[in-house]
Image (tube, coloured by chain):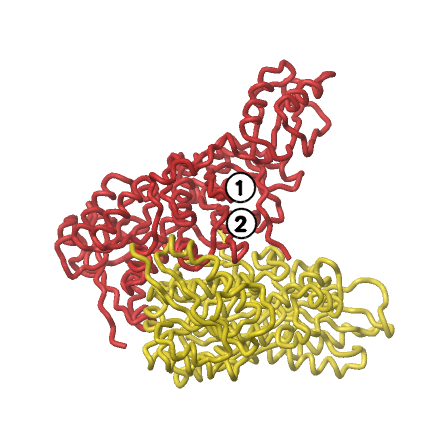
Chain colours: A red, B yellow
């Protein structure tokens, strides 16, 4: 088959942008041999045209002028690798208006403005491809949109932030406190200097917004997602959970019930230690999906990094060049926002099991008091753990796990407990997520 | 978007065929809403039109006459769910000749005649889609062909036969002997009455042939694959390996070295117990792939069964109907067979570590004898295990693990050992597969 030439413009020549350039330049021959497409990097746009990069571009293609890309009608595909939301959005809109298909890894932008951008793309008869926006090298977007197309997806449990998983893994295996584990993650390059977006759960929420839109077929926004980060997690709670057979992960969870009510949340989650997701350690990502026909499937791989992300970007470039991305993009109907409002389940209505740790004064009658608070709030105890010995301020940590209970009952109980004179400080509360294991 | 009507003919109304019919009939509305395609099951062909099935077809579409499907020009896609190689091949050829795109789960046929069928499809400007042929519900074919398209795939390690994994899992966790575990698998429906194709490794080889063709871009045939089954595995060896930190799996392995030499093999394999593949238990499948850019990715899910397989078949139907399968199929160049002959590495050249168990007579000088055999064959010992106590025939089991060694040296050493008067019976030899773990 004759090779088809595909000219590409890249905007944003940072770390991932460099990886994308490198992969296109170095793999062009292999891709041409395998797929019959000759990828040509025609233009790389960045405000910084001077700093050294880990890839050598052909003479004359690096520019600080976006119009060189926009005005070149031979360029079919524009890759946006700027990151952030403001400029990146303008660049994507300009590329779509100029008749380019867009490939991006920009999860923040798609989570905030995806529905708007998709509409503009549809209007311009162009497509936006974004495999790299979620879970880096794992082809999870295409798995949801095509591989599982025949399924009614009922639930999705993802470890989609490598920074948090790296920190929690080290807290678990090395017994480090959060601050130590974070410092080490920063030192090793797994956490940014300002790690807020990662450890707050915000980045995971971005990815959940994108994935759940396509998994459930509705326009999801960030406001639909309940988010709690890992900043307050202590190694003591990880160890206590471990003793009870649980492993702590930051999960992004999307669930759809039989009435089509959708529940979306990101929070630290105790999961059974023999669940496949519990084995996902370090900076790796994994997403477990439940489909009506397929049962449980899980995808595992590197969720970030220069080359894994570039791998997904270039896969998208190939898919766009073949025309497949465009076809899929045009055919996937997201139910518009106006229809979804009543479908999002509030976190107060969540029914979950909970891990609660309270610091009790070491004196008679304590159990009677806190157990009455739980009973008054209709919370039934599933397990308890109290080691012998006295902690700080003459208190002892008491860990309780609950049977399935409504979130609002637990919230109320925690408030009541805090007022008890026999309890020191704020109770710790972590949700236990019973991922339904698909077994023989 | 207006719905596009897609008429489908199904040949083979057995278990999986029933699942496919059920999914198309029950999910037609959901698929139409999500993707804008209206799937219509126009015709179901089977020689048995009388037996009850777990799905109720619309009046008049079940027939024993294949020509009703072939002659109906409104039917765009033919699904072959017959299984076996002879009739299924004729049916596929007839469907391609009649201008239908073909969707199939028939791994045996594709492994044996895939290259021929692909050529006929190309000549007829039609496509063959076969996601369901490998690892059932896991979208592994599309992952290799599109999701990882920008990668040079260097290795692939798969648990792709649920029957064998179910048997080995039970031997491991319940301490059952092979025959007990097989009987239980048969009772529970995870093994056929004649389990030969599964336990011999033949079925895994079929899947490896298909996946490695597309992973490595060459026409692979079954003759290129070294195959060893699990029939001779004993629980003692599983337990011994467990003591040394290994878990036994039947792996399908494809590797490509820097000189593009391809090594393809299916055999029982000891893998590190903390490798993600070691956690894949029961009838589940998983495939771990190493790509030059993405690093390690793993896909996990149900490898067989009525609805998981149907899930993959209907995903293919949708992808064919959208036109994407055809585009991908036309663009993927498999290097023709004539170029591949020198590229397949012979098993004798395999460099691996090995687990060897010998039954030694309990008398002085035994170690000197067997260790001399190993030394004479240039085999270096990495670990050894001998429990106190005497076994049958006054022998004791001695387990040795080796450093990386050529297969032909080990084969020769085993032959020499068998001749020693201090060794009882045939030595047991299981390859240790050191899957390169992609870690932080």
Q: Chain of mark 1?
A: A
The location of residue B316, given as percent across then percent down, is 42, 65
Measure the alpha-carbon separation of dots 2 and 1: 9 Å
Instruction: Using the rendered view, name the quadrant where residue A207 is placed.
Output: top left
| Image quadrant occupied by the N terminus of chain B | bottom left
The dot on residue A249 is 1
Residue at the farthest bottom position: B338
Q: Residue at x 60, y 19 (%)?
A: A417
- What SS does tag 2 mark? loop
Callouts 2 and 1 close, C-beta under 8 Å: yes
Query: Which one is in front, A11 or B14?
Result: B14
Mark yes or no: residue B332 visible: yes
Same-chain status of marks 2 and 1: yes
- Sequence order check, earlier mark of 2 and 1: 1
The location of residue A411, given as percent across then percent down, is 54, 25
Q: Residue at x 38, y 37 (%)?
A: A222
Q: Is residue B41 placed above or below A283 in the rendered structure? A: below
Q: Residue at x 53, y 34 (%)?
A: A350
The dot on residue A280 is 2
Q: Chain of mark 2?
A: A
The dot on residue A435 is none
Residue at the farthest top position: A421
Query: How crowded is the residue under tag 2: few (<14 C-alpha within 10 Å), some, or many (20+)?
Result: many
Residue at the farthest front position: B59
């Amino acid at each position: 088959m004759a090779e088809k030439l595909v000219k590409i413009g890249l905007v944003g020549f940072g770390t991932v942008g460099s990886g994308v350039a490198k992969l296109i330049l170095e793999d062009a021959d292999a891709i041409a041999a395998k797929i019959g497409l000759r990828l040509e990097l025609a233009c790389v746009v960045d405000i910084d045209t001077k700093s050294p990069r880990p890839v050598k571009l052909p003479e004359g293609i690096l520019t600080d002028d976006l119009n060189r890309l926009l005005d070149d009608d031979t360029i079919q595909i524009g890759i946006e690798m700027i990151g952030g939301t403001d400029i990146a959005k303008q660049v994507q809109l300009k590329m779509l208006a100029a008749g380019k298909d867009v490939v991006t890894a920009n999860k923040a932008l798609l989570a905030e403005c995806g529905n708007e951008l998709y509409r503009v793309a549809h209007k311009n008869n162009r497509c936006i491809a974004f495999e790299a926006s979620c879970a880096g090298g794992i082809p999870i977007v295409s798995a949801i949109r095509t591989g599982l197309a025949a399924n009614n997806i009922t639930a999705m449990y993802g470890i989609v932030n490598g920074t948090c998983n790296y920190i929690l893994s080290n807290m678990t295996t090395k017994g480090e406190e959060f601050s130590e584990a974070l410092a080490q993650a920063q030192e090793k390059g797994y956490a940014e200097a300002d790690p807020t977006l990662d450890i707050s759960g915000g980045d995971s929420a971005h990815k959940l917004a994108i994935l759940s839109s396509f998994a459930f077929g509705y326009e999801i926004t960030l406001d639909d997602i309940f988010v709690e980060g890992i900043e307050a997690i202590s190694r003591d709670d990880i160890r206590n959970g471990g003793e009870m057979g649980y492993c702590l992960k930051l999960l992004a969870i999307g669930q759809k019930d039989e009435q089509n009510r959708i529940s979306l949340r990101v929070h630290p989650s105790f999961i059974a230690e023999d669940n496949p997701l519990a084995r996902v350690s370090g900076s790796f990502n994994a997403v477990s999906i439940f489909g009506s026909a397929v049962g449980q499937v899980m995808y595992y791989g590197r969720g970030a990094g220069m080359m894994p992300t570039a791998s997904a970007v270039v896969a998208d470039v190939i898919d766009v060049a073949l025309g497949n991305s465009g076809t899929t993009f045009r055919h996937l109907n997201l139910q518009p926002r106006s229809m979804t409002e009543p479908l999002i389940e509030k976190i107060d209505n969540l029914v979950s099991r909970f891990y609660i740790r309270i610091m009790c004064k070491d004196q008679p009658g304590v159990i009677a008091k806190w157990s009455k608070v739980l009973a008054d709030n209709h919370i039934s105890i599933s397990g308890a753990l109290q080691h012998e010995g006295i902690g700080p301020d003459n208190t002892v940590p008491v860990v309780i796990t609950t049977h399935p209970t409504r979130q609002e009952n637990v919230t109320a109980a925690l408030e009541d407990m805090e007022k008890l004179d026999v309890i020191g400080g704020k109770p710790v509360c972590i949700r236990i997520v019973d991922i339904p294991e698909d077994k023989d």
